[in-house]
Amino acid sequence: MTTLAGLTVDRVETYAVALPTIRSFGVSGGAVAVAGTPSIRVLAKVSADGITGWGEATPIPAWTYETAESIVTTIDRYLAPAILGRPAWDLDGVTTAFDRAINRGFTIGAPLAKAAVDIALHDLLGRALGVSVGVLWGQRRRDTVDLGWIVAGQSAAEVADAVAEGRALGYRAFKVKIGLHTEAEDAAVVRAVRDAAGDAALWVDANQAYTGDAALRMARRLADLDVTAFEQPLPANDVAGLRRLRAASPVPVALDESLRHPGDLATFVKLDAVDVAIAKVQRSGGLTLSRRLCALAEDAGVRLMGSGLTDSDLGLAASLHLFAAYGIDTPVDLNGRQFLTSSYATGETVRIHDGVATVPTGPGLGVDVDESVVRELAVDVLARP
């Protein structure tokens, strides 16, 4: 019988892979994906006594400070040496070792890089026991997770086609990126989506784009459009502003970028400054801290929603396991399949049908990686241009 007690981390490898981009995608901070230009994802492979696990980091400089180059060097030069020789099962100890190697400072400290290794360790542990991550945790409340179709960057005159594409694929929920235009234009885009989407679930995400006054004006516009949540309207560290907005907004305020660590959620709960907490695996440094954040939200009576970072299939699967574990029953933003192709995944990976993702049940994350394809797709992001 396989046991975890003797598994010791003996190797950590990184691969920056260039994945085919299906379509362009932008947020208020800039471009996330550009059609015709490969999307770079950093895959981490962790080995322990002949067993391997894979994780993913999604560098999006338009969203946060980590780049493909910084993720590779952070893992290779700081995180990997910190955990070599450590028990693979000691996820809490790994988190502490990570914080000693790259301290939190005023943020969580390289969360995307830490997430890639943490996810890979979960995958490794599940594979060592022959069980899925949900079974490893002893926690899976759902077998499927509803997804939202993303509308981003288009003008009000253009969104009907984007909504129609999502509806044709069976999606029954839509998330709109705002903060890319003027307030009036943003409101017109959301109204156009509502008109095209009928009574489908609809929420918006500003990615920190607004000032306090502008956010309140937008919230009042959104209230007439049956919007279920106003995600991250203000800068992540504007705790006082978010508290004032939450008190005055007719639409529930959801926090994403503000919740880098479970301690951040504790602060917002204490200040009565949050309606909805967004669970996002990579933002919070992986599954270990994300579980703590979700448990805290549950215990504090804060509604949970889910989101991702335009992940390929490894990140997608990790998020599905987390959201299923905590029974998130509202549509989530896991949009990787809408914007890129996970060329490295083999066999039957994550299944999505009619806008609904089935939580994988195979060992670990449930995503089989073809390492030969990973090596073919790998690029040297540290090479001088």
Image: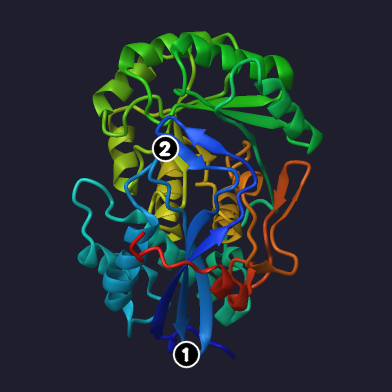
Question: Which disc, if any, is residue 49?
Answer: 1
The quadrant the C terminus occupies is: bottom left
CA separation, marks 1 and 2? 37 Å
Count numbered badges in the picture.
2
Across and down, in percent, residue 157 comes to 65, 15
Question: Which disc, if any, is residue 24?
Answer: none
The quadrant the N terminus occupies is: bottom right
Judge whether residue 199 can be spotted in this image.
no
The amino acid sitting under disc 1 is Asp
The amino acid sitting under disc 2 is Asp
Residue tagged by mark 2?
Answer: 256
Q: Nearer the viewer, residue 314 or 288?
A: 314
Across and down, in percent, residue 99 comes to 25, 62
Of callouts 1 and 2, which one flags the residue occurring earlier in the amino acid sequence? Answer: 1
Across and down, in percent, residue 177 comes to 52, 28
The quadrant where residue 367 appears = bottom right
Q: Relative to 180, say whether 352 is above or below.
A: below
Label 2 sits on a secondary structure element that is: loop
Q: Nearer the viewer, residue 287 or 299?
A: 287
Q: Residue at x 66, y 26 (%)?
A: 201
Q: On the rendered structure, is 126 left or right of 27?
A: right
